[in-house]
């Protein structure tokens, strides 16, 4: 069986010779670089970001453990934060949803069509409404209702499911609950959310109503990583649609849902393909 390729992501303090050092390391182990992108951010006195794809065929360090052990000394020498993944090992992804199914159904369709390099073993919801749509795709649907007096118990059950299914990414596909700081601290993976607003405008609930009252001419959606501060995590992707004075709140909701679907799908795809690096509260996206 032909081995998958490797994706190497690096960030570290910027200085001369970083690209040469990594390239020489790969050449030393008979590697072939298929793609390479880099960026230097002015943050923290200059931060270097690199995404590199290495051909697996013929590379002497295809085994993940061997690569980690061999690369670690070079990483320490240059103060690198880094990670490597294999393209033949799709990330295990959990979807969380409430009652609205437009983002969920879109992701499931893309998954079934092979557009998302993921495995989706579970969909978790605080409502049972969308069970038939999920089970139609042969995916396990788990209903975890919330007791308003003990929300922590439901979050603990979600974390247990993440552990059991070895989840590497969680996607809030219009999951209309605020995750607690304790949940986020214990969560073993990144969490991506879709916010139905062009953040930082119109945060919180009912953004389309707020936008309509303000008479905006564009509406948008924002996909971002979830942090303890509400709707303030690093932004991955945004897009907009034009609207007019003739559009009602319901029109804005309909148009906005179309934007939400494509923005979330693109953000999830970029994460699954290891195209995103975090720069403080910003992202570097090698799209």
Image: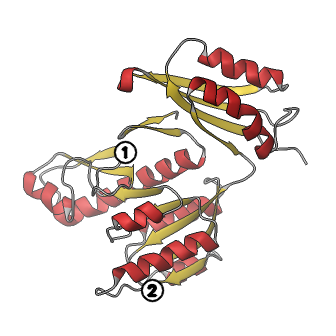
Residue 172, visible in the rendered structure: no
For label 1, the residue is: 234
Q: What element carries label 1?
A: loop
Q: If you read the primary sequence from the N terminus, does the residue marked by circle 1 or circle 2 appear first?
A: 2
Q: Residue 244: image x %, image y %? A: 16, 49
Residue beneath the point at 77% across and 33% down: 70
Q: Which residue is drawn at 41% across and 62% down?
A: 184
Q: Residues within 10 Å of mark 2 (few under 14, many from 20)?
A: some
| Colouring of the image | secondary structure
Tally of numbered discs: 2
- Where 102 sits versus 70, above or below? below
Crowding near the residue tagged with mark 1, few <14, some 14–19, many ≥20 C-alpha atoms within 10 Å: some
Asked if one can make out residue 153 in the rendered structure from this viewpoint, the answer is yes
Callout 2: helix, strand or loop? loop
Mark 2 = which residue? 128
Looking at the image, residue 53 sits to the left or right of residue 142; the answer is: right
Q: From mark 1 to mark 2, how far is it between C-alphas?
A: 31 Å
Quarter residue 37 falls in: top right
């Amino acid at each position: 069986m032909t081995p998958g390729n490797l994706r190497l992501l690096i960030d570290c303090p910027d200085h001369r010779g970083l690209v040469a050092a990594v390239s020489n390391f790969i050449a030393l182990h008979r590697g072939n670089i298929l793609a390479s992108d880099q960026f230097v951010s002015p943050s923290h006195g200059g931060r270097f970001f690199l995404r590199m794809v290495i051909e697996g065929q013929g590379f002497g360090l295809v085994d993940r453990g061997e690569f980690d052990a061999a690369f670690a000394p070079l990483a320490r020498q240059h103060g690198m934060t880094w990670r490597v993944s294999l393209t033949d090992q799709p990330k295990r992804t959990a979807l969380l949803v409430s009652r609205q199914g437009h983002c969920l159904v879109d992701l499931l369709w893309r998954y079934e069509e092979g557009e998302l390099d993921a495995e989706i073993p579970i969909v978790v919801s605080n409502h049972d409404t969308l069970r038939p749509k999920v089970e139609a795709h042969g995916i396990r649907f788990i209903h975890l209702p919330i007791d308003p007096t003990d929300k922590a118990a439901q979050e603990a059950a979600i974390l247990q499911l993440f552990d059991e299914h070895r989840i590497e990414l969680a996607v809030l596909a219009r999951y209309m609950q605020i995750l607690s700081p304790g949940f986020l601290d214990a969560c073993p993976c990144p969490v991506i959310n879709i916010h139905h607003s062009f953040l930082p405008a119109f945060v919180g609930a009912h953004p389309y109503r707020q936008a309509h009252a303000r008479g905006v001419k564009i509406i948008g959606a924002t996909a971002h990583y979830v942090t303890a501060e509400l709707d303030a995590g690093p932004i991955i992707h945004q897009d907009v649609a034009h609207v007019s004075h003739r559009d009602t709140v319901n029109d804005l909701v309909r148009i906005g849902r179309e934007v939400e679907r494509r923005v979330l799908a693109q953000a999830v795809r970029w994460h699954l393909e290891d195209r995103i690096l975090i720069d403080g509260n910003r992202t570097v996206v090698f799209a």
